[in-house]
Amino acid sequence: MGPRRSIFVALFFLCLLAGCSAKRDLIILLPDPDGKIGAIRVTTRGGSQILDQSGYAVEVEDFNKPPVAPRPIAEGEITGVFGAALSAQPDVTGRFISFLLFFESDTSELIHESKVLLPEIVRTIRNRKRNEIYVVGYTDRVGTELYNLKLSSRRAYYVRDLLVSSGIKSSDIAVSFHGETMPLVNTEDEVAEPLNRRVEVIAR
């Protein structure tokens, strides 16, 4: 798992296999609605196995023995076994998801960690069923209010242009900016606060 949340969907199925009177657990790892893949450790008294590949499954035949090594499951089998459970899952793609991008002081230059985050933001937006994107710029309190309002505008439009250059439609993006008026961390005037030098990208 990275510093950000990694979400996964693991489906559990208790079934009777032909010719066997013992029940077996089948655990399959699937991506979340945004395409992210996490990892899950399946543990019994006899040992454990890690699932970290989409579409792979682990079987538990006997709780006193280690789980069977992960194996790929055909899409048709997943649908056949778990179709009803998958269709009953709530649609989370209509919910808002947000990312924070941070900037070097007094510039519209992203810090390194935020540059690395950009591909994930683009991928998340592309994977959602509907695109309603808000890009909102902010600054810390170093400088005048008017200067910071303009700086927050430059930052917001810079991020908007990065998204557009990555294939996101400009018509799907609404831009706004608030200067120093809505800090994440409250400070005195003229205090440089890295967490306030930011653009928030909100996708629905």
Image (cartoon, grey):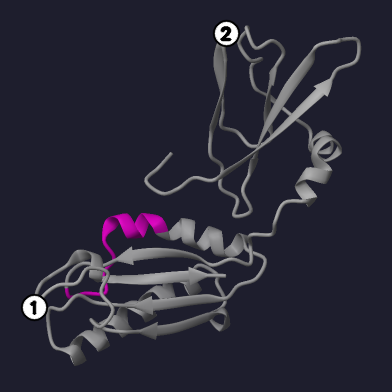
Discs 2/1, front: 2
In the rendered view, would you say 125 is above or below 177? above
Label 2 crowding class (10 Å Cα cut-off): few <14, some 14-19, many 20+? few
Please name the residue shown 57% across and 83% down the image.
171
Say whether residue 31 is left or right of residue 86.
left
- The residue furthest bottom is 146
- Mark 1 element type: loop
Circle 1: residue type: Glu
Q: Earlier in the sequence, mark 2 or mark 1?
A: 2
In the rendered view, would you say 126 is above or below 54?
A: below
Residue 71 in the image, given as x and y percentages of width and height:
69, 23
Front residue of 178/20: it is: 20
Helix, strand or loop under label 2: loop
Please state if 17 lies on the left or on the right of 204 as rendered: right
Task: Please give the range of residues in magenta.
Answer: 106-117
Q: Quadrant of residue 113?
A: bottom left
Name the disc covering residue 152, or none: none
The disc placed on residue 46 is 2
Q: Which amino acid is tagged 2?
A: Gly
The residue nearer to you, when weighing 164 against 89, is 89
Residue 25: x percent and y percent? 72, 22
Give me the residue at 90% from left, 15% from top.
18
* Residue that label 1 marks: 190
The residue located at (67%, 30%) in the rendering is: 56
The residue depicted at 26 percent of the width and 88 percent of the height is 150
Q: Answer yes or no: do the residues labelled 2 and 1 have beta carbons within 8 Å?
A: no
Q: Is residue 112 magenta?
A: yes
Q: Report whether 17 appears left or right of 145.
A: right
Q: CA distance from mark 2 to mark 1?
A: 60 Å
**Which residue is farthest right?**
19
Residue 163, image x, y percentages: 47, 71
